[in-house]
Amino acid sequence: MKWILILSIFLCMNDKIVVFDKENNSNNWYIVNDGVMGGVSTSKMNTDKTGKAIFSGEVSIENNGGFAMTRLPLDIRFDDKKSKLVIRLKGDGKEYQFRIKSERSQYFWYVQSFQTSTKIEKIELPLSEFYASFRGRKLNLDNFSGTQIKEIAILIGNKKSEAFKLEIEKIVLQ
């Protein structure tokens, strides 16, 4: 319990909240692919020897499928001074979606797409640009303006069959 208090104090002083870090990887990510609707896409979330989270697999559009997703439950509360998520990663040149939920029981996600290159890079995603979406359809709701995140996810679903690999080093809220 002491380490949680110390970590909280450190994070407040640092004005960043570490969502995921290869140095402190809890590895509680889990997979939800298009098999929930009859698809046959496959994916996995592994940790390499340096602690990076590696999200990889094969997206298939067979059987009306076409997506792979990894999810991480969280319990992050923050002040309204936090304005963006910053992800340090190495991609594969493909487009992905970053998703957040502000409540566990929320039926929709707040979504923002991002393009990767094949180099290590920092992707900045302004919180105010996450829009509400349910099953691929944009909802007529305000963009994200909350002060808590209960779950994040990364999804690939580019309407084509393709292999993918995303190496995630760090995700911070600042």
Image (cartoon, rainbow, N blue to C red):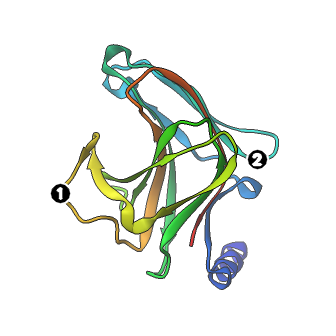
For the view shown, which residue lies furthest in the top direction?
62
Residue under label 2: 51
Q: Is residue 117 above or below residue 139?
A: above
Q: Residue 79 carries which label?
A: none
Q: In which quarter of the image is the C terminus?
A: bottom right
Q: Is residue 103 above or below residue 82?
A: above
Q: In this view, does 93 lie above or below 34?
A: below
Residue drawn at the location 43% of the way across and 18% of the way down: 40
Can the viewer see residue 40 in this picture? yes
In front: label 1 or label 2: 1
Residue 97 x/y as whole percent:
45, 45
- Could you say which is closer to the camera, residue 140 or residue 115? 115
| Residue type marked 1 | Asn
| Residue type marked 2 | Gly
Q: In which quarter of the image is the N terminus?
A: bottom right
Q: Is residue 17 above or below residue 30?
A: below
Residue under label 1: 140
Residue drawn at the location 39% of the way across and 24% of the way down: 35
Q: Does 142 sit left or right of 13 as displayed?
A: left
